Image (cartoon, helix red, strand yellow):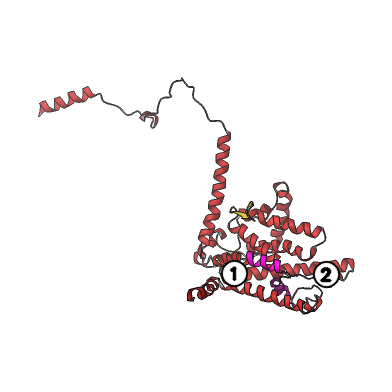
């Protein structure tokens, strides 16, 4: 009995602190929301718990805390299945502080953009429903942020979805963004549009602002991941790379000009090697890219016909020593060697 009673406590103790806190906040606030709705509270009365654009100025904490409220049991179960294991993996790579910063920035900035969009729609269409009839909640922004983080760390890793579909990690974020776009086009802007904002915010944070542990190597911090494999243009299909590259380069130039992007003094691709478990993740990432390049090289080699030799044709001569140097090495016949040995014996 002692073993059975201590097993859950050991499991909870094995969860990193940041992941444990976020999971507990999700469970507590979601059940608080269910209780208040069961007692008869309507959505406007819960503006202190969930994000309502027109009331957010009076309850600014909802820009963050609303993400820990899942409005249905199904959404809560889905978030508990996806988010805690993902954050546990990331926290072991990044540490608790960087994980909390990533979660807070992804959620808060995405909700700020969503509120700003609602106010803009209200000013254009003069419809108060954009301010008071839309309630943002749930962890959709964090879910897409986690997918972006996995794309940075293990892009070529293959996962199996629902036991049927197989996909590489790097294809999942844009599939989720596409789903968000479809839902917005058919009229479900709230809350699905935060998926698009979460994708963009999490990418910018990981690309330019996330602090890497490069202090040991250079004496100062390094930020982001400026590698070509994590470039913004790689999110899009090749036929629109040219305009996307132009747009991204223009935005980067302006951000650099106004000192909006921090600079580091080391190669940011080396930043993960100093974190617990980071070397393994980075090694897996590089190994996957090397295997992909090797497969392409083998495929191109197999497509080109190799020279074949005739079945009864002469065998080409094997290169001898003379083929390795321009001056041939003189050889001595065995009989000549024997006569020289006999002459030496006679003189003795």
Badge 2 marks a residue whose secondary structure is helix
Crowd band around label 1 with a 10 angstrom C-alpha radius: few (<14), some (14–19), many (20+) = some
Reply yes or no: does residue 336 show up in magenta. Answer: no
* Front residue (pair 205, 257): 205
At which x and y percent is residue 305?
Answer: 56, 30
Question: What residue is shown at x 55% (from left), y 51% (from top)?
Answer: 288
Closest to the observer, 225 or 346: 225
Q: Which circle marks residue 188 in the picture?
A: none
Indicate the quadrant where residue 106 lies.
Answer: bottom right
Q: Which labelled disc corresponds to residue 98? A: 1
Q: Residue at x 78, y 59 (%)?
A: 183
Depicted 253 relative to depicted 221: above or below: above
Q: Point out residue 312 in the picture as x, y percentages from the top left corner.
A: 46, 19
Where does the image place residue 95, in percent across and percent down from the top left? 56, 69
Q: Is residue 70 magenta?
A: yes
Residue 194, position in %: x, y?
74, 64
What residue did someone put label 2 on? 119
Residue range of the region highlighted in magenta in the rendering:
53-82
- Looking at marks 2 and 1 on the same chain, the residue that comes earlier in the sequence is marked by 1
Q: Is residue 272 above or below residue 301?
A: below
Q: Residue at x 32, y 29 (%)?
A: 329
> How far apart, in angstroms, are the residues tagged by discs 2 and 1?
31 Å
Mark 2 is surrounded, within 10 Å at the Cα level, by few (under 14), some (14 to 19) or many (20 or more) other residues, namely: some
């Amino acid at each position: 009995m002692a073993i059975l009673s201590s097993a859950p406590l050991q499991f909870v103790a094995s969860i990193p602190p940041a992941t444990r806190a976020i999971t507990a906040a999700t469970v507590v606030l979601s059940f608080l929301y269910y209780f208040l709705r069961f007692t008869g509270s309507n959505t406007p009365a819960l503006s202190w718990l969930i994000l309502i654009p027109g009331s957010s100025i009076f309850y600014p904490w909802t820009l963050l805390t609303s993400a820990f409220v899942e409005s249905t049991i199904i959404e809560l179960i889905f978030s508990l299945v996806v988010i805690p294991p993902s954050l546990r993996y990331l926290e072991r790579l990044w540490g608790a502080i960087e994980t909390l910063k990533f979660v807070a920035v992804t959620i808060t900035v995405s909700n700020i953009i969503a509120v700003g969009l609602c106010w803009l729609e209200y000013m254009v269409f003069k419809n108060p429903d954009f301010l008071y009839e839309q309630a943002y909640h749930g962890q959709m922004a964090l879910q897409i942020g986690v997918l972006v983080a996995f794309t940075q760390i293990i892009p070529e890793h293959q996962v199996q979805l629902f036991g049927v579909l197989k996909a590489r990690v790097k294809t999942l974020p844009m599939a989720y963004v596409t789903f968000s776009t479809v839902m917005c086009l058919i009229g479900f802007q709230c809350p699905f549009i935060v998926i698009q904002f979460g994708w963009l915010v999490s990418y910018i944070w990981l690309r330019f602002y996330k602090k890497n542990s490069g202090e040991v190597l250079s004496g100062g911090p390094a930020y982001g991941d400026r590698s070509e494999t994590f470039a913004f243009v790689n999110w899009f299909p090749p036929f629109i790379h040219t305009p996307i590259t132009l747009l991204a380069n223009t935005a980067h130039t302006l951000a650099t000009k106004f000192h909006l992007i921090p600079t580091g003094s080391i190669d940011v691709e080396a930043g993960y090697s100093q974190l617990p478990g980071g070397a393994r993740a980075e090694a897996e990432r590089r190994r996957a890219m090397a295997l992909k390049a090797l497969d392409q090289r083998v495929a191109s080699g197999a497509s080109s016909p190799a020279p074949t030799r005739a079945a009864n044709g002469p065998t080409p001569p094997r290169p001898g020593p003379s083929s390795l140097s321009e001056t041939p090495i003189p050889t001595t016949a065995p009989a000549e060697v024997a006569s020289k040995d006999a002459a030496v014996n006679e003189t003795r």
